[in-house]
Image (cartoon, rainbow, N blue to C red):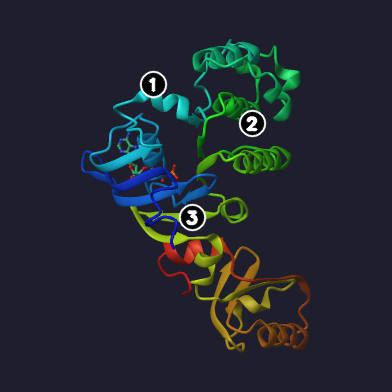
Amino acid sequence: MSTSEVDIENSVITVRDFRKKYGAVTAVDGISFNVEQGQIFGLLGPNGAGKTTTLECLEGIRRADGGSLKVLGVDPIREPRHLSSLIGVQLQTSALPPTMTTREAVKFFCAYHGVPARYDLLEHLGLEGKINAQYNQLSTGQQRRLSLVLAIAHNPPVLILDEPTAGLDVGSRTTLHNLMAELKAQGTSILLATHDMAEAEKMADWVAILLHGQIVAAGTPREITAAGSGLTRISVRTEESLLHTSKNDFPAVQQRIIKDDYAVYYSTDPGPTVAALLEFIKNNQDRLVDLRVERPNLEERFLEITTPGAPS
Ligand code: ATP
């Protein structure tokens, strides 16, 4: 049974026929989905697809124009105080007073939620050395990590994250992913809006792709990827770039594009394609610099779905 369609009993977040306009702009055009307990649900979509609008309506920051949104049965607009104990939300950077210290921020947020100050979480996110630093003395990545500490300090059953890894270095990104996995193992449900397809593929149990305010694909990352064209991407870079101007008559190739220094081929059968490409390079006295063969992944599928003219 599809997670996003019917299983309301287990549903922690329930969105039904949700609509939102800003003046003449339709930001979200009647979407429905469920997030179940202990699930990481990835909300994907290009810029302007309606992801943040959806999250903000679930957080009670904005009011929906139609349909219904519930978090553990709570209407975000009608019961904001109750909602705040149920959800953890990462603040936007610059949301805290610039001279507030890390210690003060943790103390303040935990007092608001009526829980003991969770300074231990600072260590978990590599901020223990910054406990006396002012907010304006933290780097952007450190500010984002602090906002995550503040989001989870009251141990909310639902976490709503809007591009949590944007601006994080590789180490912090891994730390965040490990933390998300730990929270999920403890039963926390996570709604994650992200542009990072590798992150969605790795972390999400279920994803929905939004395009122009509508859900155009939903399923596990594996299901979504499998529903695509199944073309393998072969990227070739050579010293003389002779492939850029050659005839595109290599076997099993459906499409070729030129991207930066690479000739990129989409193939239904990579073996013969690669063999023919290598033969061409040898016969024309060019030299291979780089060759990458990539099976279809979520990013490929996402581009197929969201980019007009992409191979399908
Ligand atoms: P991004 O990936 O760029 O963050 P998004 O998927 O989060 O995009 P939204 O921020 O929800 O998209 O925006 C959806 C649409 O609503 C866009 O067309 C955007 O221009 C419009 N929009 C968002 N906020 C406002 C606002 N406050 N006033 C008017 N239009 C808005």
Instruction: For the residues labelled 2 and 1, say whether their Cβ atoms are less than 8 Å apart.
Output: no
Indicate if the residue with disc 1 has its beta carbon within 8 Å of ligand 1.
Answer: no
- Which residue shows up at 41% across the image and 55% down it? 4
Q: Nearer the viewer, mark 2 or mark 3?
A: 3
> Marks 2 and 3, how far apart in space?
26 Å
Element type at marker 2?
Answer: helix
Residue carrying label 3: 207
> Marks 1 and 3, how far apart in space?
29 Å
Numbered tag placed on residue 288 in the rendering: none
Q: Is residue 143 left or right of residue 70?
A: right
- Which residue shows up at 76% across the image and 88% down it? 283
- Say whether disc 2 or disc 1 marks the residue closer to the N-terminus: 1
Q: Quadrant of residue 80?
A: top left
Q: Can the viewer see residue 312?
A: yes
> What is the x, y in percent for residue 83?
40, 27
- Say whether disc 1 or disc 3 marks the residue closer to the N-terminus: 1
> What is the x, y in percent for residue 216?
38, 60
> What is the x, y in percent for residue 309?
42, 70
Q: Can the viewer see residue 163?
A: no
Mark 3 Cα-neighbour bin, 10 Å: few <14, some 14–19, many ≥20? many
* Front residue of this view, candidates 33 and 244: 33
Numbered tag placed on residue 141 in the rendering: 2
Amino acid type assigned to the residue bearing label 1 in the image: Arg
Mark 2 Cα-neighbour bin, 10 Å: few <14, some 14–19, many ≥20? some
- Say whether disc 2 or disc 3 marks the residue closer to the N-terminus: 2
- The answer to whether residue 140 is above or below residue 293 is above
> What is the x, y in percent for residue 11?
42, 46
Numbered tag placed on residue 81 in the rendering: 1
Indicate if the residue with disc 3 has its beta carbon within 8 Å of ligand 1.
Answer: no
